[in-house]
Image: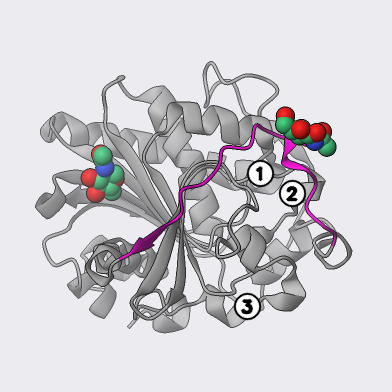
Amino acid sequence: MFTLTTILLLSPLPLSVVALPHPDANATRALVPRAVATMSAPQLNAYTPYTQFARAAYCDSSTLKDWSCGKACEANPDFQVNTAGGNGNSIQNYFVGYWPSKNTVVVAHEGTDPTAFESVLTDVKLLQRSLDSTLFPGAPSSVTVHDGFANEHALTATAILAAVKNLLSSHSSAGVVVIGHSLGGALAELDALYLTLNLPSGTKISGVTYGTPRVGNAAWSTYFDSQVTNFTRVNNRDDFIPILPGRSLGYEHVAQEVHILGTDSAIVCPGAEDTTDAQCTTSAVPNIFEGNILDHLGPYQGVWIGTIFCT
Ligand SMILES: *[C@@H]1O[C@H](CO)[C@@H](O)[C@H](O)[C@H]1NC(C)=O
Ligand SMILES: *[C@@H]1O[C@H](CO)[C@@H](O)[C@H](O)[C@H]1NC(C)=O
C-alpha cells in the first residue's frame, strides 16, 4: 500500500530540500500573476459532494460495489456505481459510476492513509519518467511525472477507461469528473489527462482533488493545463503534502488551487503555481516544518478524509 510514509519517502529529500527558498519561477514557467479571490461559504460548500466522494474512496471496496459505505455514500445517495476495484493494498481502491444529479461520470481514487503504517514499499524509484505513449498518446517526451505515481496509475487506467466509455455510451451528454485525496489526487490528476487524450474531444472532463502532491515537472503542468481546463486542487490549511516533492527538485503543480484557510474561509489561487500570494499554499507552507500533517486529513469544510473516517 502506498501510504503517507511512502509519499514522504518518495519525496526526494523533503527535509533538506523543501526548506530551501523556491527557485525563481523563470526557471520553470512564465509567471502568470494571480488574481486571488475569496470564496463565499456557499461556494466552498459546493465542493462537499466531491469531498464525500474522495472520502468514500477509502471505504472497503465491498461496500463501494453496492454503495453501502455509510455516511460518505449516503452523502451522494443517487450515485450509481458501475465498477469498484483495487484491493486497498497493492492496487489503490477506485470506483467509477454515474452521478445523476450532476449528469456526470465520477472516477474516484483512494489515497494515502497516515494511519496505515503497514505500508510495503517495493521497487519504487524516486525518478520522474516520460508518460507511457500508449496510455498518453501525443504527450511530449519532455513531460515527465513521478515514477511511482505513473506505475500506480497504469495499474487501473485501462479498467477505468473501459468503465467510463461504457457509462458515456449510456449517458451520452454526461461529463466526467475525476476525484481523489492524497495519492488518490495524484492518480486523479493523471487520469484527467489520460481520459482527455483517450476520449472523444468535446467530452467535458474536470477534476477536484484534495491534498495532492506535485505530480510532474514544469512541462507536465504546462501540457496538462493546455489539455485539462477545469481542474481544482483543494488544499487544507497547513497541509504540507501539496508542497512535496519540492519545486527545487523539478516538480510543478498544475493550475488552480482552492486553499481552505478555516471554517467557511477559503481562497481561489488560479493559474500556474507561484509565490505571489502569501495565502496560497506554495507561500503559506514554505517548508514541512511550518506545515501540519494532520491538516492533510481535514477538515475540508467539515469533512475528514481517510480510512478511519469511512463510516
Ligand atoms: C525573470 O523574468 C523577469 C521578467 O522577464 C526578469 O526581469 C528577471 O530578471 C528574471 N529573473 C531571472 C532570475 O532570470
Ligand atoms: C468544472 O467542473 C466542475 C466539477 O465537475 C463542475 O461542477 C463545473 O460546472 C465545471 N465548470 C465548467 C465551466 O465547466
259 or 123, nearer to the observer = 259
Q: Crowding at label 2, few (<14), some or many (≥20) Cα neighbours within 10 Å? A: many
Q: Which residue is mark 2?
A: 247
- Asked if the stretch drawn in magenta spans residue 25, the answer is yes
Q: Measure the alpha-carbon separation of dots 3 and 1.
A: 20 Å
Residues at discs 2 and 3 in contact (Cβ within 8 Å): no
Q: Are marks 2 and 1 in contact (CB under 8 Å)?
A: yes
Residue placed under numbered mark 3 in the picture: 293
Secondary structure under the numbered disc 3 in the rendered image: helix
Image coordinates of residue 99 in percent, x first then y, are 17, 52
Mark 3 or mark 2, which is nearer the start of the sequence? 2
Residue 90 is one of the magenta-drawn residues? no
Q: Secondary structure at mark 1?
A: loop
Task: Residue 46 in the image: state x and y as whole percent.
Answer: 24, 63
Report, in whole angstroms, how far the alpha carbon at label 2 lies from the one at label 3. Answer: 19 Å
- The reply to whether residue 2 is in sight is no
Residue 252 image label: 1
2 or 3: mark nearer the eye: 2
Q: Under 8 Å from ligand 1: the CB of mark 2?
A: no
* Amino acid type of the residue that numbered disc 3 sits on in the rendered structure: Ile
Residue range in magenta is 20-39
